[in-house]
Amino acid sequence: MWGQLVRVQDLSRVCPNCSSMLELKHRFVVPGGRFVEPYYWDTYFALEGVLRSGLHELATESIRNLLDLVTKHGFVPNGARVYYLSRSQPPLLALMVKLHYEFTHDASFVCEALPVLRREHDYWMDKHKVNVHVSNRVWELNRYFVDIDVPRPESYSDDYELARNVSSSDERRWTQVYADITAAAESGWDFSSRWVGEPDAPPERLLQTIRTRDVVPVDLNAILYQTEMAIAELAAVSNDPALAADFWRQAETRHEAIDAVMLDHESGLYFDYILSDQRQSRDFTAASLWPYWAFNATHSDQQTDSVFNYVNHILDSNPGGLPATLRTTGQQWDAPMAWPPQQYVAMQSALSTNHTHLAQRVAQMYVNSVFCA
């Protein structure tokens, strides 16, 4: 199977001025047979399988490509194309290096990667940081944010038409649409009712209310918590206790901020935070479970039981798996779509809280959907 998804560039044929491909020196895994370039967050989930298949060198090469991109561009682009250089995707690179170490115990690779991981973390803290005022405190969290005033090159006509449907003449609104639609693409959830101001709008108008930069996403901040914990653990492997302590402190501060801003104590669910409304979104999405995996809460209490009973209830009416959201809008990251990364996170969240039967149910439903539908 992996042989069908592994690609390698012929660097002798890569023309900087006549190809949109970014140069990659090593082999990589594509997310599907029609692709010729790797995508950022897809690579993490591919590596879970690659490493479990014993293909350690392929995993090393895949990660090296991403490290090279950070070294050259300061971040990992959405995909290995020139037209993706305006945005990234969910930052899972540190988790890839940690996963690689867990399988290979290659400390030298950790030492090589660690400065690059710090540089990527700096990018997210510089470009995507936002202050949230809750409970008489200012909490520092992150959002998807792209500062761009033109349509995405790969979807130019779609973005151009969307902006003109929002306003026929207001160039300021056009710029806002371009930035928010590109930020939504950065999230990996392109597109979803998570990112709009009027989720109940008719499907043809839904994206006209796009406001991605107004949303503080729960999954992004859970990922950055995992990133900070991973860098701390990798720093310990590389015998840098000062760096490890620094990133542990950053992770602890983020954990506190996520709980303060995004946790609904009544339901136990985590929600996106809407900056302009100064409130949680209150819409359940598959992202709501990511903190239960990130925080590795290896216990089960009454509130946690309530959360996963609710997930079981959702699965009762969604035989294809846990849907991205509970809204049916026609967008591919809304119901009834059940994407593989979301099933993976749901399973990890359930396992972290000793809800093993739920993890097995999610896994079986996904296998049934893929192979038996």
Image (spheres, grey):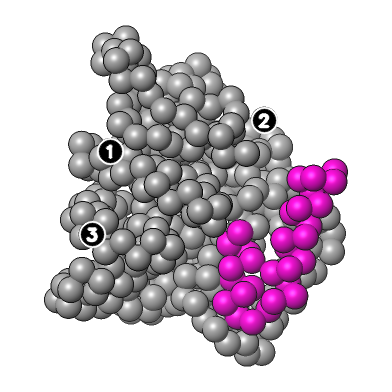
Report the amino acid beneath label 1: Leu
> What is the spatial separation of the Cα atoms under label 3 and label 1, in whole angstroms?
20 Å
Q: Nearer the viewer, residue 294 or 186?
A: 294
Q: Position of residue 281 (x, y in %)?
A: 56, 61
Q: Which tag, 3 or 1, sits closer to the chain's start? A: 1
Helix, strand, or loop for circle 1?
helix
Residue at position x 58%, y 25% in the image: 34
Q: Return the residue at label 3.
A: 108
Residue at position x 25%, y 78% in the image: 249
Q: What range of the chain is rendered magenta?
A: 344-373
Furthest residue in direction bottom, as rendered: 301
Helix, strand, or loop for circle 2?
loop
Q: Which tag, 1 or 2, sits closer to the chain's start? A: 1
Q: Quadrant of residue 319?
A: bottom right
Does the CB distance between marks 1 and 2 fall below 8 Å?
Answer: no
Report the amino acid beneath label 2: Glu
Report the amino acid beneath label 3: Ser
Q: Quadrant of residue 307?
A: bottom right
Circle number at residue 69: 1
The question of residue 364 being in magenta is answered with yes
Q: Return the residue at label 2.
A: 204
Residue at position x 71%, y 37% in the image: 330
Horizontal arrangement in the rendering, residue 333 relative to residue 311 (left or right): left
Helix, strand, or loop for circle 3?
helix
Q: Nearer the viewer, residue 96 or 92?
A: 96
Q: Position of residue 337 (x, y in %)?
A: 71, 46
Q: Position of residue 283 (x, y in %)?
A: 63, 60
Up the image or down, 201 lies above or below 237; here it is: above
Horizontal arrangement in the rendering, residue 5 relative to residue 91 (left or right): right
Foreground label between 1 and 2: 1
Q: Which tag, 3 or 2, sits closer to the chain's start? A: 3
Foreground label between 3 and 2: 3
